[in-house]
Amino acid sequence: MKRLLFLLLHLISHPLIQSEPALSYEHARQAVLTAEEKLMTGGHTHLSTQEAKVDDIFMEYKFGELSQGCRNAEQNAAALHFFKAKPLIDRSVVFNFLQKMPKGAVLHLHNTASVSSKWVIQNISYMSGMLRCTTATGHSVLTFRRLPKEHKCQSQYVLVADERKNSVDRQVYDNNFERLINLYTPVPELEYPTITHVWDRFQDIFSVLGDALSYLPAFRAYHWQMLEELYNDNLMYVEIRSSCKKLYDASGRTFPRKRTIRELYALNNKFTQLHPDFLGMKIIFAVHRGKEVDQLRETIAEFKQLHEMYPNFVVGFDLVGQEDKGKPLYTLLPALRDLPSTARLFLHGGETNWFGSSTDINLLDALLLNTTRIGHGYALAKHPILLNAVKTRHIAVER
Ligand SMILES: [Zn+2]
């Protein structure tokens, strides 16, 4: 392999003089193209005759859409902002094909952002007793209990059902309601001019919906739907990041985290019994990275208990939230070192545009902490030594 690389490097760094036969030029050219192709995903995959037939169909679709994009840049979904590309993706035969194909696993999914917003509107927001209040910053909080201090309400609670009934048009009300929990806008460049704008809005959505999803009946329905949607996308297995919040019911009772895990465990059992071809879900306990070391220590102590009770279900630990603003892993080391050796780490790392900052150095600490996978890892490309370590240690990068 080294000899081949040397030969290829030699060929491209010493252009062939014209007097040499044209074939050598063609050979050199082809050799480089073939070598690069082999480095691509699937470069060393060999297809059976049947698989090759499927591949032919798929590639026909793919080249069809790529050439359409090549002719018309506005139709080039792969080069557009996701929101601009979304309508094209929905119509895309490639996407349709991929949706039906059997897929292995989802290894990076935050549970509270895992279900389609349409379903949440049509189901959770129609559950009797849903309340809404507004905070000082004008954000809505959705809930099924009255805790004005905790919800930071500046307004009275109103019943969503009453608001909807009194609205001029129910459809318009539901569309506006969906905007509370969906980041979509047709003009992202105007609404989210910087990374901070989009992160703030993104994190707001979790606080809009968070308390409503901790209401036991909503929690059950929502997570069941999450599994349904994954199953319908022909997935076989999922590991979800969850903060495993405490739950409450209509009578005002609250339940500890143990109960949250027990609920998820029971849902998983029921779902896999009904769908034996689905392998099930596991939980990665996720904590916000803005916590102080002492607070993190307390949460890790709780995680330890849950992991001991369900070692094969609550499998690991992660820190979530905007890395650029949160505490660097290095400052949280005293708490992270308390994690039990049987629990694996699935750390978000290097989810940043910065270089040489504490954020991209999170990747180094994630590796020193022996992370099993890395969430996003965009900054890896700027750290060749770390990238090499990720490859040699077979650490998967979740994009
Ligand atoms: Zn994430």
Image: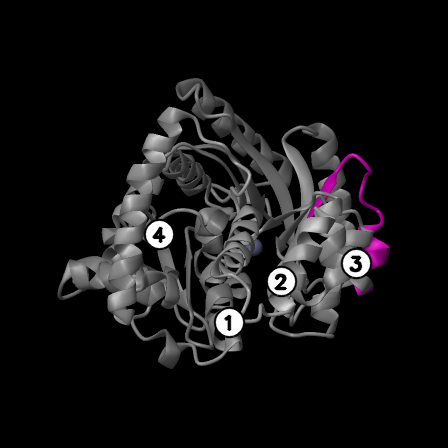
Mark 2–mark 4 CB contact (< 8 Å): no
Q: Earlier in the sequence, mark 1 or mark 4?
A: 4
Q: Earlier in the sequence, mark 2 or mark 4?
A: 2
Q: Earlier in the sequence, mark 1 or mark 3?
A: 1
Q: Position of residue 77 (x, y in %)?
A: 32, 62
Which residue is identified by label 3?
A: 365
Q: CA distance from mark 1 to mark 4?
A: 25 Å
Pick the residue in front: 264 or 399: 399
Give the residue displayed 34% in from the left and 47% down from the top. Answer: 124
Label 1: few (<14), some (14–19) or many (≥20) C-alpha neighbours in 10 Å? few
Q: CA distance from mark 2 to mark 4?
A: 69 Å
Left or right: 62 in relation to 349:
left
The amino acid marked with disc number 2 is Leu
Which residue is identified by label 2?
A: 11
Which residue is identified by label 4?
A: 130
Q: Position of residue 151 (x, y in %)?
A: 50, 63
The amino acid marked with disc number 3 is Asp
Which residue is identified by label 1?
A: 200
